[in-house]
Each structure stands twice: as C-alpha cells, then as structure tokens.
Amino acid sequence: MSNEENSIEIKMADIGQRAKKAANILAITSKEQKNKGLIAMASSLLVDLPTILAANEKDMENGRKKNLSNAILDRLLLDEDRIIAIADSIIAISKLADPIGKKIAQWDVESGLHIQRVRTPLGVIGIIYESRPNVTADAGALCLKSGNAAILRGGSDSFYSAHAIHNSMVKGLKSAGLPVDAIQLIDTINRDAVGEMLKGINGNIDVIVPRGGASLVARVQADARVPVFSHLEGICHLYIEKTANLNMAVEIALNSKMRRTGICGAAETLLLDKAVIDTHLEPICTALTNAGCEIRGDEIVQSKIAQANAASEQDWSSEYLDAIISIKIVDGVDEAIEHIAKYSSHHTEAIVADDKSVVDKFFTHVDSAILMHNASTQFADGGEFGMGAEIGIATGKMHARGPVGVEQLTSFKYLVQGSGQVRP
C-alpha cells in the first residue's frame, strides 16, 4: 500500500468514527433542535449566496474547459434562483413531520403483550454524487431531519460549489448546537476515498446512496459491501393512449422531454397508440421539433414525420439525457406494457388517457417505482411529492423505492410492553 493510499484509509477511518459518534447524538436529538439547525442552514445559504455563486463559476469554467455536455453543465449550474430554491427546500424539510419515534403500527397479542413498531434512524449514510452541487444540501438536510449522519463525496466537477454549500451548512449546525460531524464532506477527489466508503469504513457506514451516471452507479452496485439505495438509469416512458386529450398529450409530451432534458425523470421514449396516429402524432412531433428535440422513430413514424430519423434497437434502451426522444407506435395498452417491461429501467412511466379501465390496467401491470396518469414524467421528484427534497430515486424493491426522503432514510424497531409474562 502506498503512502497516499494509507493516508486516505486513515483519513476515512477518522471520518467514519466521527460520523458514527454524531449519528448516536442525532438519534436522540429533539425535533425542535434538528429543525433549528435546518432553518439556520437555509439562512446561512442565503447569506453566503455570493460566495456560492463565485465557487460555482469556478466549476462552470472548469467544466467548459473540459467540454462537459450541456446536460452535465445544466446539472452543475447554480444561479440565484436555484440557490434560493435549495434554501426553500431545506425550509420545507424542516416543516415535515419528524419520522423518528413515529408509531408505524401497534397491537396486542394473546399473551397480553403490547407491541409497537416505531421508526428509528438508519445511522450513517454515505452519499456519492457527481455534478449536482444541490445534492450536498438536499442530502445533508434530509439526513439531519431523519436523525442520520451524512458522509458526502461529491465529484470533481462540482468540487468548489459543493464545498461552498457545505461550509454554509456547517455554520447552521454550529449555530444550532448540533455536532458539526453530522454532515461531513470529503475534501479529496482521490477515488480511493470512494473505495473506502464502499467497504463501509470499518462498519461505520450503514447505507450507500449513489447519485450520478450509469458508470458510477454500476461501480457502487458491484463493489459495495453495505446496502445500496440506487437507480442505474432513468429510461422513462410516456404512453399516449387512444382516449388521450390531444392538447393535454402535446403539453405533457413536450414538458416530459424538454423541461429539463438532463434529469433522470425526463421522458426518453414516447409510445403512441396506433388509433391516434392521424390526430396526435404530427402535433406532438411538431411541438418537440420546434423546441429543438430530435425525433428517432420506428418505420411508421418515419413515414409520417419528415424530420424523424430511424430508431435503432439501442434507442429503445437509451437514456439520452439530451434533446432526443424515440417514438414507437403500439397497438393498444398491452403492447405498451410489453415494450415498457422489456426496455424500462423501472424508474418512471406515464400514461395519458381518459379511459379509467386502461389506466387501471397500466397501473396494475407496469412494475416501475413511479407511475403517472395525465401528468409529466418530470414530476418524479421528492420535492414535487411533498417530501421537501430527495437524495435520489430508488428503483430497487428492498426497503426504499421511488423518491428517497426522510421516511425512506429510517428503519424501525419493536417496543414490547408486558406485565410480567414468561413464555411457557
């Protein structure tokens, strides 16, 4: 082992130990004190807004020099409105009900025992992310609210922005009398630090949450020795069914794809019922192309839309994160469901339809974390779900699925009350 590797291992071990101590304190910290810390963090972010903007400009300049894609630059960008939105999200998190100690269920059994199941923190949560500096605030705030300590490892692209945001959050922790180690940001871009997190830092990390591109998530899923909440890709589908209102279909298709093309909730494939080819296809494609979107279609779409390029087999399983959409004509809801089952990443799927029986069938048979009816796929977001914010969207089926908010960052324990019972 080199001196540098040994140094990183020692440093990460110290971070893990301090996080565990902070987590033990947070587990018994009152909701009032946690909320005080969150409100102080939000205030500090607004006070430090010029400093954060200056730090972000350094990251943006470096990103442009490295020829980062427009999607990544959009994720990286902070402006005054986005920083205010980050602060507002923290305030929203402070107003959520505190999950810790909440009774999930209670019952009595024949022996006379009274049993309660109550929420508890997970402990120490490691969050590995890339070009989204807002994750620093969202993850830190959600972990604090749910009584967990956070170890954050941002990417090199957002290095300066993440550190500026973290400095503001530490000020909030201090002013509320909370342990500053409750939210730690690793100050090295050395990838060995990620390796130590994936090993659990000597048992001090309880859960890992990766938030980034497919290569990052794949590495975490392959190498982690602790539980992982993650999604690999956001291959989201929008199905326009034959009973869909035309104006609604056009607006939802446009918003689902083009509001922000670089987020995981952006629609990547549009499925159109063959019964409405003559009425719906051209208006939808015109709206998309006028907004700068490239159309990649099957043979029918190509025959109807002059601007459409040919869709390959790979297109149906592509997360573009760009102004590109693949369009396929399907023969009813069954074929739409079949296509989604084959190509979906189980993140978010939406249906535009007025026929309730069709919507019910879609909701019953499509197995994805989030299903939408007559709404844009871009609502796949913890903030839009009333969770204040999210650490990410989990597409697995164990523990957390969908937006990972404060309740998803908890476990539970059983409290059993007796009156002297012994088991025969």
Image: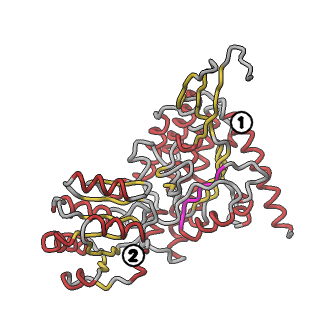
For the residue labelled by badge 1, is the local secondary structure a helix, a strand or a loop? helix
Q: Nearer the viewer, mark 2 or mark 1?
A: 2
Residue 165 pos. (x, y %): 56, 51
Does residue 106 appear to the left or right of 311 in the view shown? Answer: right
**Contact (Cβ within 8 Å) of mark 2 with mark 1:** no
Residue 397 pos. (x, y %): 53, 54
Image point (54%, 69%), residue name: 214
Instruction: Kindly identify which residue carries mark 1.
Output: 24
Q: Nearer the viewer, residue 407 or 33?
A: 407
Instruction: Kindly identify which residue carries mark 2.
Output: 316
Residue 161 pos. (x, y %): 56, 58
Crowding near pointer 1: few (<14 within 10 Å), some, many (20+)?
Answer: some
- Magenta span has 315? no
Up-down relation of residue 9 to residue 289 (above or below): above
Does residue 357 appear to the left or right of 163 in the view shown? Answer: left
Does residue 131 appear to the left or right of 371 in the view shown? Answer: right
**What is the tally of numbered marks visible in this picture?**
2
Q: Which residues are magenta?
A: 207-213
Type of the residue with mark 2: Trp
Crowding near pointer 2: few (<14 within 10 Å), some, many (20+)?
Answer: many
Image point (36%, 68%), residue name: 338
